[in-house]
Amino acid sequence: MSQAKAVEGVFAIHKPPAITSAQVVRDLQKVFNPSELFAPWLANEKANRDRENGFQKKRRRDKRLQVKIGHGGTLDPLATGVLIIGVGKGTKHLQNFLTCTKAYDATLLFGAATDTYDVQGKLLSKAPYSHVTKEKVEKALNGFRGNIMQRPPIYSALRIQGKHLYEYAREGKEVPVEIQERPVTVEKLEIMEWLEPESHDYKWPVEEAVREEKEVAEKILHLSQDGAGGSTEQSMDKQTSPSGTKRKRPPAYVEGDLIYDISRAAKRREKDSDVVMSGGLLETLEDEPPETSAREEQNADTATQESSMAILNVAQNPPPTITAQPPSPSPALSAHSTSQTMTAGPPAVKLRMTVTSGFYVRSLCHDLGKAVGSLGIMAELVRTRQGEFELGKNALEYGDLGKGEEVWGPQVRAMLEGWQTKMKGGRNGATVEEGDAEAGEEND
């Protein structure tokens, strides 16, 4: 009887900013484990475990009795939007959502590059942006539609010689082989809104990478070959004094388009002998507890405590949106000769896209910034659709978890039962749309 009432399958939740995808899973387990809705599922699971032999019980890695939950494609803390959740046997179908179309709304901020290609990374480089206009961006977008080649960012879950790319970055190590471009398809790409300087609140990150980190980034990201910033910014060691003599390199200087600060690097070396680069995104799927990204690993302990407390009050106090802090003036930037006016602030653009498997929105922002003769980082990302799940249509609001089972229970039951009905009818919920394919971002 309880088995007939047990519900499992796939549904979607609207992930808020400031928490990781893995934390959403943990929060769901805290809410689902004591609930009436999933009591039959837990009873069935206990009965199944009681029938296991000794060898099977010994092999079981997770001996805790709790609702089995996984997610189908990581969104990093900066991003919001559709996060696919599998419950029970539904976790076995999450792989299908890594081969389905995804739609994103993203904001690109011009004039800077970071190690993670977004505003949560460390600042590597700055470039002129006063020449960047909506018309130039519109023209450049033509080169990013259709079937294109794209190089994944260093902070991704792709493996090279058995090691995740983000692990090389976190350890400050050069990737042993070239990160190859991959074919992806952009089905739709358009400008939603053009944001003139001073008309928005998006800012570059404050923290600059230290010298060693920038040297690693130079090798991995090939910034000196970008053709943006380096051709317009004079290196400090090439500048001359009014008398015509060559200046000695000051503590802060520019090499190519990388901004170095010797004093900061020295302080960092005294403080920490291991060079670790910030941030990270994963293109991941877990049948079992989900793998976290580099950034998730760094913040998981704090996020666990904060989110567990916040989930009880989230209905009354929705999570705030994320914006980067205003940048501090760079002595390296102010020292060199350039026609760029930095006081006006950089422009930004909001893009809407529908993309396919393996596509990284952060790479698009990085590459589009270069294409218009500047640099670019992702300032905001919303996954508006993944497969058949869409924001405002059939995705549970995260805030409803704090309103009690009487609010979230009927919604989750309806979505899971709808999924079960589709599966019984021989239809895979992740591929009900024609032409479905997937974006591996986050994150990305």
Image: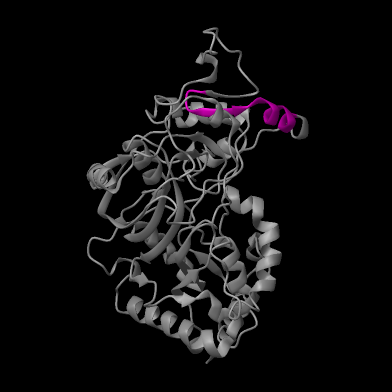
The residue positioned 23% from the left and 44% from the top of the image is 139
Asked if residue 174 can be seen in this view, the reply is no
Residue 425, compared with residue 337, is above or below; it is below
Percent across and percent down for residue 254 are 54, 24
Q: Which residues are magenta?
A: 255-269
Q: Is residue 296 visible?
A: yes
| Residue 259 sits inside the magenta stretch | yes
Image: 305 above or below 338: below
Q: Position of residue 159 (x, y in %)?
A: 48, 40
Give percent across and percent down for residue 6.
Answer: 51, 84
Provide residue 204's location: percent of width, then percent of height. Answer: 52, 46
Q: Which residue corresponds to the image point at 43% horizontal and 52% vertical from the top-left? A: 441
Q: Nearer the viewer, residue 55 or 350?
A: 350
Within the magenta stretch, is there residue 422?
Answer: no
Residue positioned most to the front = 242
The total of numbered circles placed on residues is 0
- Is residue 42 positioned above or below 60 on the image? below
The part of the image, by quadrant, that contains residue 50 is: bottom right
Q: Residue at x 41, y 50 (%)?
A: 197
Q: Relative to 176, say whether 80 is above or below.
A: below
Closer-to-camera residue (97/327): 327
Observer-nearest of 287 and 200: 200
Applied colour scheme: one colour
